[in-house]
Amino acid sequence: MFTETATPMAARDQPNSWCSGVMSSPAVVAQAPAPMTTSAVTAATHQARWMPVRVAVSIVMPRPCAAARRGTSGLMANMCKNRAMAGRVAVLVRHGVMPMELGLVHQLFGRALSPAGEPLYEVVTCALVPGMVRTDADFPIHVAHGPEALAEADTVIVPASHEPDETETEGRLGAELAAAFALIRPGTRIASICTGVFVLAAAGLLDGRRATTHWRSCDQFRRLYPTVRLDPDVLYTDDGDVLTSAGEASGIDLCLHMIRCDHGAAVANEVARATVVPPHRDGGQAQYIRRPMPEPQSASTAQARAWALEHLDRPLTLRELAARESMSVRTFTRRFRDEVGVSPLQWLTQQRIERARQLLEETDLSVDRIAADAGFGTAASLRQHLQATLGVSPSAYRGTFRGTLAAVLPPG
């Protein structure tokens, strides 16, 4: 543990050090230090030149600076410090790679420039075997570099593949992937996009750590990698030297986050502006998942549900819904749960949220009016339900779907 009077030693000229630079935050709560991993120790002691650094508050660092930097898209860490020149990015592609995921890495890191206009990153694409690599589109790509490029990388990024391998079917690395990962230097930052997280988990990089992946793959991931603390509700996770993103588009959020951590908000914002994307999105992938309720034609509560959907703007009671089917409240509740899988009140809340989402996406109605039309009564109630369900406010949700470009386009 470092205190106000301590002068810990931090690597000065080490490209892969998470601890270069002075670090200070009044928001970190001291706790018992966790053991450092072998790779973290190797990275922290790689260079021979050191300089004393004063730390303003009492903090601990389970992995180099990871405790301060660990976070998600919903809460940006204040203590994102530059990784003194994390300039070489290697993208490891496999057969079935998505061109969008490969392209977004090149576009975003390639657009990061110094004040003098010099590129801050060199991005290379590598494959397990150099040559033609199939994509999930109707064209292949030619990859000039083999896995040896991983040995020179400061950051390794693994995009998804639509051709499942052992990492997605058996929970293990194949021989070629294992040999490739053995080339990665200790202390290298490793990130995944979408289901590329399966590769990181199979390599043992995520045991006991927080990660995310596309919501459609969460059940499969949990089954194969039960020791990983999967968070399906965020756009990306940052656990220090290992980062993961939820889906293809959230790979943009993750890359901007890494650029922001390496070179600051100004550089990341310029990259976002050039790419015409928001520099930061609130909430998580839960806001993009539709949850329609089953509507079997023969269901005994279907008529009540159809009527309720036409009257969401008014208070609805169980007694009123049950009367639509000529049932007692007890019988109606039991049959409703059997048919739909949730209670009538839970279903009503879900449908009100869906109505509010639709109005936020498609209309210019005020939040007060939308709250009334969806049956929440007040804007405060709508905000509370959206925050609890989707992790965003009504205005942030509307901005995500209708107004994000205004935040990144130049005026005029």
Image (tube, grey):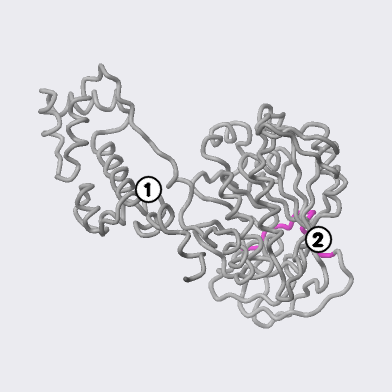
Helix, strand or loop at mark 1: helix
The residue at which mark 1 appears reads as 389
* Residue in the picture at 27% in, 33% down: 343
Residue 89, relative to residue 47: is it above or below?
A: above
> Which of 373 and 293 lies nearest the eye of the viewer?
373
The reply to whether the magenta stretch includes residue 36 is yes
Q: Quarter of the image holding residue 30?
A: bottom right
Left/right of residue 179 with respect to residue 60 in the rendered view: right
Q: Which-is-in-front pick, marks 1 and 2?
A: 1
Left/right of residue 157 with respect to residue 247 in the rendered view: right
Mark 1 surroundings: few (<14), some (14-19) or many (≥20) residues within 10 A = some
The percent coordinates of residue 26 (x first, y second) are 55, 76
* Residue in the picture at 67% in, 44% down: 207
Left/right of residue 356 with respect to residue 377 in the rendered view: right
Q: Residue furthest top?
A: 298
Q: Amino acid at mark 1?
A: Thr
* Residue in the picture at 46% in, 54% down: 283
Q: Which mark is residue 141?
A: none
The residue at which mark 2 appears reads as 43
The reply to whether the magenta stretch includes residue 280 is no
Residue 34, relative to residue 310: is it above or below?
A: below
Mark 2 surroundings: few (<14), some (14-19) or many (≥20) residues within 10 A = many
Find the magenta span and give its range: 32-45
Q: Amino acid at mark 2?
A: Ala
> Which of 227 and 75 lies nearest the eye of the viewer?
75
State how far apart marks 1 and 2 are (Cα): 40 Å
